[in-house]
Each structure stands twice: as structure tokens, then as C-alpha cells.
Image (tube, rainbow, N blue to C red):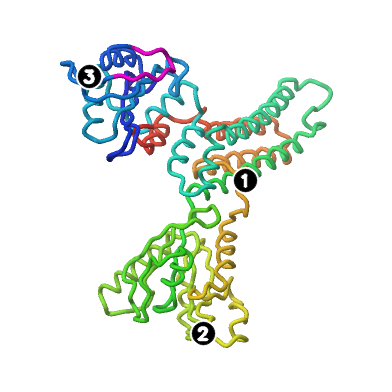
Amino acid sequence: MSAEGGTICAVATPPGVGGIGIVRVSGPAARAICTGLTGRLPPPRRAELAAFRAADGEVIDSGIVLFFEAPHSFTGEDVLEIQGHGGSHVLGRVVQRVRELGARDAHPGEFSRRAFLNDKIDLVQAEAIADLIESGTDAAARAAQRSLQGAFSRRIHELQETLTDLRVFVEAAIDFPDEEIDFLAESDVLERCAAAVDRLNGLLAGARQGRLLRDGIVLAIIGRPNAGKSSLLNALAGADRAIVTDIPGTTRDVLREQIDLDGVPVHIADTAGIRETEDRIEAEGVRRAREALAAADVALLVEDVTRPAPEDDALQREVPAGVHCIRVRNKIDLLPAEAAAGPAPEDAVGVAISARTGQGIERLRTMIRAAVGARDQAEGAFSARQRHIDALLRARAHLDAGRAEMAASGSGELLAEELRLAQQALGEITGEMLPDDLLGRIFASFCIGK
């Protein structure tokens, strides 16, 4: 049950005009609401045609009603689905009647939160619902579906069971200090800890891949004016998304585009040429370009190979630490064949391309994926978020600390405590050990109907 309790309702279909609009109701008053709205309660899980009536008997709409009896529903409560005609006005009248019959408006994510609190799904699965709705690529949708089916949660639980077995052994040895044999010293406890860390590292690698599939890569394209930045954006997007001219300073603002890079969403920011300028509008574009660069995971420093200049090296020095920089030697189609085949700059990762002809673009796409550790195949990946990665890193830190204490002093007590803290960090991922305020913030990011 949610913190406020009661019966909740919400429109579960997107705003706008459509053939079908769905209103969801969950809570103890669902049965009475169905009877008050349609005149009867259909048998559980059987769709029936009904008229939806106002308090005075006027027909508001007609459509299908479905009743799901607790605990055999998504939320674990009595749930009613009202499927009428799409359109904000008619759905608004149905919702108003449902409110009159005893429901209140649901908070964002409250249906999923009730499913979580009633043990129908864990927190990872609840988040996977939102990730599936928001997925922008086929790979991201498949990863979210695997998390929704419990792939990520099962691996977390398996690791927790491994740590539980280790804790039982360590704490049993601590409880019998008078035995002639030092069980901890004679055992393979350190090897078992190392094996647990290896399993955690594998899980962490999968979570990082899942975060990439969910959140994508933030890519900033920088360079001198007329180096071909907008042409490169168009080449990566596979369409003319940016205006391309020979006039320096054509791009005055940050142009943003999202592309699918072999299953990984890439959020591209095509920036204004970074240079000193007296033009106030262009100067504002340069300022925004530097902001986009600071927020990027990867920067593409585009250089015009027909006009080499020391400013390119100065631009590379503007790339913040932690942002992977790839130097892109553009316009090689304008060079003699032997010059175009020359190596990229030796002081940086680089690639030679022609944004106009497409030469070298596939190589650049591969380098972008490699820069953030994206694997070529996302099969078997699961959806994950940054909070999951943070929790896994804390669990690993506790395991490493426990191993170090055990190796240095043979202290089983300190090892047992670090194992407990590692389990607690893992429990935060599935929601078993999560503060209520953080739980509220997570579900607040969901859409109302979920």
C-alpha cells in the first residue's frame, strides 16, 4: 500500500486524440467504482462491453471494462481498467466520475510503487518498466525487457547468497574461538572473497553496458569554424539535420540530435566554432559550446586537413579531463590520395574521414563506441541506472576492505562487518534496503499512469 493509501486512478494512455483511451483504478474501492460507473462488476479477467454513466445516468462513453481481483493484479490490489474512446475531454469526464465514486488522482509512478510495496515486483523491475517505456533503440528495449523479467535481479540475489554463505562461515568461526583449529586461517576464505569480487566485477560490467543502452552517450562536436562539424553531424545522423555553408560562424547555437549507434543512443551536440569573436551572438554560441563540451562523454575535435592550424592543438587543451577526445581529420577527399592515407596526429587518438563522401565514418562510429566501453553485442544485457553502478562500486569497496583487513590482521570481525555492508549496498539495488525518501524520488520520475 502507498503512503497515502486509498484508491487511485489515472489515465494510462498518452494525451491527445486516439482510438482508445484507458483509465486505470487500483485500490479497495475499485469494485464499487466499477458498479457505480457501469451498473455491474464483471467476473475477474473477463472483458465486457459496458456504458460508462454519470451520476444522473447520462452515458459518458462506452467501451470495455476489465476487473482484476487482488492479489492477482499488477499492483496486488483490486484493479479496474476502463477502456473507452481516446480524447482528453471524454477521458476527463470518466476520471471525474471515478473520483466522485471514491478514487483520488495517482501520483507519478504510484501504480508501480504499489506493485513494489506489495511484492509483485522488486525495485529493479519497477525501474525497468519506466526504462522500457522510454527506450529509444531496439537494444535498449530488449535490455529493459530482460530486467523486467528479472535477469538483473537474479544476478543480484545470487551474489547476495554467495555473501550470505561467506558470512555464515566467518561468523561461525568467530563464535567458536576456543577450537584448536583456526578455521579462518586454515580456510580458503580469502579465495572465496576474491571469487565474489570477480562475480561482482562481471555484474558491474553488465550494469555499465546497461546504463549506456538506457542513457546513451553524450557527444560534443567541436572545432574551428568551417572545419565540417555540421557536415559530420549530418553524416552520423544519416540526414541533413544541420545547415552547412562555407560561411564561418553559420552555427550560432548548440544543435542537438539523437542517433542510434548500433543499439546505443548517442546524444550529439553540434557546437559553434570555438574562437575569439567580437560578434555578441556568435560569442554566446561559443560560450554554449564550451558548456556542451564540459557535459560530454566524448568530444570529436574536427580538423580541416586542407587548412592545418595550431588552434586545433589549443582546442584539444580545452577538452576537460575525463572527456574522451577523438581528433577527426576531415575533408580528406580534398587531399591527394597519398596525403589522405597518412596517419592521424600522433599525440591523440584520431581518424581520417570525409564527412561529405562518408569515407572513414564507420571507423569513427567504432571508435566512439570503444571510447565509452560499449560492447559490439548487447545480447544478454540488462537495463541499469547510475544508482545501480554506484551501489555495486560500494559493495566492491566493502569486499576489498574486508579482504585487506583479513589478510593484514586475520580479523574475522572486520571481514564480517564489511560483508554485511556489501550485502546492504546490493540490497539497495533491488529495494530491500532503501530509505523511503529515496524510494519516493525514484518513483517520482515515472509517468502518472504507471
Q: Amino acid at mark 3?
A: Arg
Residue 283 placed where, x, y %? 30, 73
Which quadrant holds the N terminus?
Answer: top left
Mark 1 surroundings: few (<14), some (14-19) or many (≥20) residues within 10 A: few
Q: Amino acid at mark 2?
A: Leu
Magenta stretch, residue numbers:
41-50
Q: Mark 3 or mark 1, which is nearer the start of the sequence?
A: 3
Nearer the viewer's eye, disc 1 or disc 3? 3
Q: Do residues under tags 1 and 3 come within 8 Å of each other at their CB atoms?
A: no
Residue 57 placed where, x, y %? 18, 16
Nearer the viewer's eye, disc 3 or disc 2? 3
Mark 2 surroundings: few (<14), some (14-19) or many (≥20) residues within 10 A: few
Viewer-nearest residue: 445 or 180? 445
Viewer-nearest residue: 231 or 318? 231
- Residue 379 is tagged as 1
The residue that disc 3 covers is: 53
How far, Cα to Cα, is label 1 from label 3? 49 Å
Above/below status of 248 relative to 261: below
